[in-house]
Every structure is written in structure tokens, then in C-alpha cells.
Image: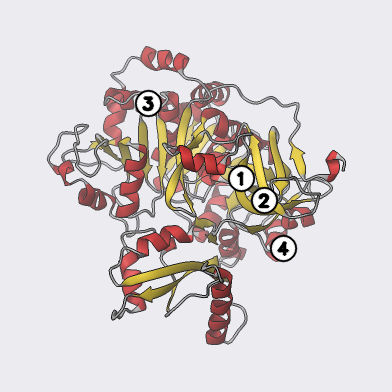
């Protein structure tokens, strides 16, 4: 069997990888495009040039040093999209501190786990967002914050956390404000940052992103400068970005979609980062694209659908759009056609990847035929390898499904402080086993056909049932629980929990949901709850989740009077 008949592809490229740290590359970008618009944040009325962004980045980097933080320290950020987020992203990189992305939807239990798992020494946080009172949740975990001096927190529950920095101004005891750090940074000699920069290496860890697993608790995927800087660059290349581009980024910054596909793709090409709001809202996206004359737009399919179906959609001029990225879940062909035809995005691309690979491995190009941009996730990225293997680990022929494995510059260092789980995911030859079932055709286009891992994708968010199951097990009335995904027209999939109660207990659906609220993210709370006496099982005692799913599809269809739910 010839090499070309096997499902193995590699991104041969004459474009070299960037051999610099993010901080060094950022400085060169600022020098090259200093007067160009770097950042527009509509809801904060902010419009900064590259030079103005760099001023704040350098001051914050110095401010972090001023409060006693050092290279290698983990700095959490718990906030929706705003200017402070991107300043923090580049400031931490400049001084070699590891930015820990914390989902803005996290509640108390998840926040405690994240901060303790990686030993965050500082946390930069919003005061509140929507229904989340961040400072109140922190007080539940660390009441000591109200009686300590800023930077001297010693909390029993969060033993390594020393400093809490609020993005908004505050006079609360025990806290720094973001502006305070900028002012403190003015007192730090510039030479200190310059000397630090000489010590940093591009293979140093710079970012931790939490990704859930089938074993339950989230794992901290640890990424380097080299990982995410190069991935951002080649993502921008696939869209043919240049300094004239203005990229509308309504996707969350805590996720790779925002901070890598968005921010790093922009700064490697001199493009402008444009944030329409602190969270996704279809009207604000449409207004921003028109007002800022954005040339690119990002989103998961549900975001594009919400924009296209907005009652005022036809009133907006979107003719400035050219390209963008749709990712996170499969895109229906009719939606893609409307994005191309109605939104002027003739060069829109599809991307596929995973957090552990920085994230993108495959991406369509701006000139791929429409059927390839809808029916596949494109071809291999430069300098990346992928193979499709069978259960025995052997590479399968083209067009035959198997597990997608990938390796290359983009592969994470591993899961933070978790060598056993890392070894389960990355084999001795440094292949990352993704758990996704895929095919590769004769032309090298990849199609994702299923998932080996027991995962649900709800509105672009990866939700792992085991994590929810383990949380629900904490309820004293619940004897056993199994969580599955069921089809949903709006979100792609929704969460469904089958629950066996303990002997003699009674429980209502609302009681289950209330137990989840304020403890786990809203998108993980089961929409459907079914109380059962037993689960469908194999002869060997394994739960048959596919049987559960089929039963729920039928039950929900009967309730709605339609096969489509």
C-alpha cells in the first residue's frame, strides 16, 4: 500500500516556524504597526493603536512584578471579554508568567478546583458578570480576603493564592485594582523586564486551559509560547490576514477560539482585534461589523444562525466582510451558504482542533470549493502531522474511519501536574490521541464523523458527562446517574440526566437543577431529567448510553409531536 493511500498527512511548508517568545514577537509587531489600530472594544468605548496597547501591556507586566510575582507563577483570569483580558494575555507572556484561563461561567466548586489544581498565586477578576457575583463567590472560598492586606491573602481553602486583582475599581480591603497595578508598574525600571525577556525561552509554558475529560475533573492543558504563537500565525495565514483586516471577535477569550484564533492571529498580521461586547449578542455583532467595517467574523454555527435570524438583520450593511472562521461544531450546509451569500463572507473558513493542540490542526482555505468548506474541516495545517488509526493503532486506508491522532509543534507540554493522564493521551511517539473519529480523502481533506470520547457539544462548548455525573453523585438523594446528550435544534445537543434515586427518596426535576445552580456552569446543567429504576446494560454490566439516547429522542419527539427536537 503506497503512502498516499494511507490516512497520513503532514503539512509540508516552506514558511518557517516562529522561533520567538510571545513577548518578543509582540514587541516587533508594535514596532512595525505602532500607529495602526490594534484593539477596539465597543462596550468599553476603547480604541487603541498598537503603541497604546503596548503601553498598557508593559505597565501591567511591570505591575505584576511589583506585587511580588515571578516568571513561572500561575495567574488566573476570570472575566468576560474586555480590554483588560487582552492586556493581561500579553503582559503575563512578557514576564514569563503562566496565564490560567478560567471560564466566566464557572461557579464556586469549579473555581476552587481550578485555582487549587494549578496553584494560582494571583487572580485577575471582574467583580460580576450577568448572574455571577465573582467577588461574592470568592468570599465563600476565601473570607480572609476581607481582613488581609492586598497581596497578602492566606486562605485555608486557596492556600497558594496571594493576590486578587479586580478589573473594576474598588475600595474593598484585601484587593488590588487593575489600575493600581498599572500605576505600580510605572515605578519598575524598564530594564527589569528587558533582562527577564532575555531569560525566557519559547518552549516555556505560558498558558493553561482547562479541558474536561471522561474521567471527570477538568485537566489543565499546558501550552507554550511556541504552541499558540505559531498556531495563531498560521490561522491568520489561512484567512489571508494583513494589516488592513479588522476581525470581529464575539467568541470568548478564555477559550482558544478567542485568544489564539482571535488575538494571536491578529497581532501576528497587524490586524485589529474588535470585541463587540462582553459576551455574545447577535445585535451587537451586526452593529459592530457595520460600524467598524470588519473584514472578518468569528463564531460557532449557532452564533451565525442567531445573526442571520435577527429581525433587524436586513437593515445592516455587512459588505465589508470577506472571511472569518466557523468552528466548534458541524455547520449545516444551508447555514454556510447563507453566510457566504448573505453576509458577504465568500472566503469564510472552517477550522478543527482541540485545546491540547493549540488548537487548530485542520482548516479550509479561502479558495476551497464550497462543498469542501461545508463537508470537511479542510486540510492539514503547516508543520503538523495527522494519522487516522484503527483500534490496534495501525494507520487505515484513505476514506476509512478511525481515531484521529496528531503531533507537531502545536502539541501541548501535557496536563499540568498530571503525568498519568498525559501519558494516556500522548503516546511514546508524541502522538496526541484525540478521541475523534475521522476520515481523510484522497485530496487530504478531513471529515470528523464521530466521537470516541463520551462528549456532548452544546452550542460549541465541550461538555463531558462524567464531570456532571460526579457532581450529581454528591446529592444525598441520588444513588446513580448517567448523563447523555440529545439532539437540539438551537444548541446542537442538550444535556440529559437519567437518575436512580436512593431507596425511599423522592425528588423533582427542579430540585436537580437547583442543586446545580451556582455550583457548575449554566451550560452543564441538565435540561432534561428522567428518573428511572434501572439503566440499559450490556451482559458485562456496562451502561448502554446509545440505547438511552435513542429512547430519549423518541420520548422527546412524542412530546413535541415531531421527529425533530
Foreground: 279 or 487?
487
**Looking at the image, do the residues carrying marks 3 and 4 touch, with CB atoms under 8 Å apart?**
no
Label 1 belongs to which residue? 433
Foreground: 389 or 140?
389
Q: Secondary structure at mark 3?
A: helix
Q: Earlier in the sequence, mark 4 or mark 2?
A: 4
Q: Secondary structure at mark 1?
A: strand
Q: Where residue 564 sits: x, y (%)?
A: 61, 78
Residue 61 is labelled as 3
| Disc 2 residue crowd, few under 14, some 14–19, many 20+, Cα 10 Å | many
Q: Earlier in the sequence, mark 2 or mark 1?
A: 2
Tell me: 235 left or right of 481.
right
Q: Secondary structure at mark 4?
A: helix
Q: Where residue 24 sits: x, y (%)?
A: 51, 21
The residue positioned 49% from the left and 38% from the top of the image is 39
Q: Secondary structure at mark 2?
A: strand
Q: Earlier in the sequence, mark 3 or mark 4?
A: 3
Single out the mark in the foreground, 3 or 2. 2
Q: Farthest residue toward the front?
A: 540
The residue positioned 38% from the left and 24% from the top of the image is 71
Single out the mark in the foreground, 4 or 2. 2
Look at the image and tell me whether residue 221 can be seen: no
The residue positioned 33% from the left and 36% from the top of the image is 119
Distance CA(mark 3)–CA(mark 4) = 45 Å
Label 4 belongs to which residue? 333
Residue 403 is labelled as 2
Amino acid at each position: 500500500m503506497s503512502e498516499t493511500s494511507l490516512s497520513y498527512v503532514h503539512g509540508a511548508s516552506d514558511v518557517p516556524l516562529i522561533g520567538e517568545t510571545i513577548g518578543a514577537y509582540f514587541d516587533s509587531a508594535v514596532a512595525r504597526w505602532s500607529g495602526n489600530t490594534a484593539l477596539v472594544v465597543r462596550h468599553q468605548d476603547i480604541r487603541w493603536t498598537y503603541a497604546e496597547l503596548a503601553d498598557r501591556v508593559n505597565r501591567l507586566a511591570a505591575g505584576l512584578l511589583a506585587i511580588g510575582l515571578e516568571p513561572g507563577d500561575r495567574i488566573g483570569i476570570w472575566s468576560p471579554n474586555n480590554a483588560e483580558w487582552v492586556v493581561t494575555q500579553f503582559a503575563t507572556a512578557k514576564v514569563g508568567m503562566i496565564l490560567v484561563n478560567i471560564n466566566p461561567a464557572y461557579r464556586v466548586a469549579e473555581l476552587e478546583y481550578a485555582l487549587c489544581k494549578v496553584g494560582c498565586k494571583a487572580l485577575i477578576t471582574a467583580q460580576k458578570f450577568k448572574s455571577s457575583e465573582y467577588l461574592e463567590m470568592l468570599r465563600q472560598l476565601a473570607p480572609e480576603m476581607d481582613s488581609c492586606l492586598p497581596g497578602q491573602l492566606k486562605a485555608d481553602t486557596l492556600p497558594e493564592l496571594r493576590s486578587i486583582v479586580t478589573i473594576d475599581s474598588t475600595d474593598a480591603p484585601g484587593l488590588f485594582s487593575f489600575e493600581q497595578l498599572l500605576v505600580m508598574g510605572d515605578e519598575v525600571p524598564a530594564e527589569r523586564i528587558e533582562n527577564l525577556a532575555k531569560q525566557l525561552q519559547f518552549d516555556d509554558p505560558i498558558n493553561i486551559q482547562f479541558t474536561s475529560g471522561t474521567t471527570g475533573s477538568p485537566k489543565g492543558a499546558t501550552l507554550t509560547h511556541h504552541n499558540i504563537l505559531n498556531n495563531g500565525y498560521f490561522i491568520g495565514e489561512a484567512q489571508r490576514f494583513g494589516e488592513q483586516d479588522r476581525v470581529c471577535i464575539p467568541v470568548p477569550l478564555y477559550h482558544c477560539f478567542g485568544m489564539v484564533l482571535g488575538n494571536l492571529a491578529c497581532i501576528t498580521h497587524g490586524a485589529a482585534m474588535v470585541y463587540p461586547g462582553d459576551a455574545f449578542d447577535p445585535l451587537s455583532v451586526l452593529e459592530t461589523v457595520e460600524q467598524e467595517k470588519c473584514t472578518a467574523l468569528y463564531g460557532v454555527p449557532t452564533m451565525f444562525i442567531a445573526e442571520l435570524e435577527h429581525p433587524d438583520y436586513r437593515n445592516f450593511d455587512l459588505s465589508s466582510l470577506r472571511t472569518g472562521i466557523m468552528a466548534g461544531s458541524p455547520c449545516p450546509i444551508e447555514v454556510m451558504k447563507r453566510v457566504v451569500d448573505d453576509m458577504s463572507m465568500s472566503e469564510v473558513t472552517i477550522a478543527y482542533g482541540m485545546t491540547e493542540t493549540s488548537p487548530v490542526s485542520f482548516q479550509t482555505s479561502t479558495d476551497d470549493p464550497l462543498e469542501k468548506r461545508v463537508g470537511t474541516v479542510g486540510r492539514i495545517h503547516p508543520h503538523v502531522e495527522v494519522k487516522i488509526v484503527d483500534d490496534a493503532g495501525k494507520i487505515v486506508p484513505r476514506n476509512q474511519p478511525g481515531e484521529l491522532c496528531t503531533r507537531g509543534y502545536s502539541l501541548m507540554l501535557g496536563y499540568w501536574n498530571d503525568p498519568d493522564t498525559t501519558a494516556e493521551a500522548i503516546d511514546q511517539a508524541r502522538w496526541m490521541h484525540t478521541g475523534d473519529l475521522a476520515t481523510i480523502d484522497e485530496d487530504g481533506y478531513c471529515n470528523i464523523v464521530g466521537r470516541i470520547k463520551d462528549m456532548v457539544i452544546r452550542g460549541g462548548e465541550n461538555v463531558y458527562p462524567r464531570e456532571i455525573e460526579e457532581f450529581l453523585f454528591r446529592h444525598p438523594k441520588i444513588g446513580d446517574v448517567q448523563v447523555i446528550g440529545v439532539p437540539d435544534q438551537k444548541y446542537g445537543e442538550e444535556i440529559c440526566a437519567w437518575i436512580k434515586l436512593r431507596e425511599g427518596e423522592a425528588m423533582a426535576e427542579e430540585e436537580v437543577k437547583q442543586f446545580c445552580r451556582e455550583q457548575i456552569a449554566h451550560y452543564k446543567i441538565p435540561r432534561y431529567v428522567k428518573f428511572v429504576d434501572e439503566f440499559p446494560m450490556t451482559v458485562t454490566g456496562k451502561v448502554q448510553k446509545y440505547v438511552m439516547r435513542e429512547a430519549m429522542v423518541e420520548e422527546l419527539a412524542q412530546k413535541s409531536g415531531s421527529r425533530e427536537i
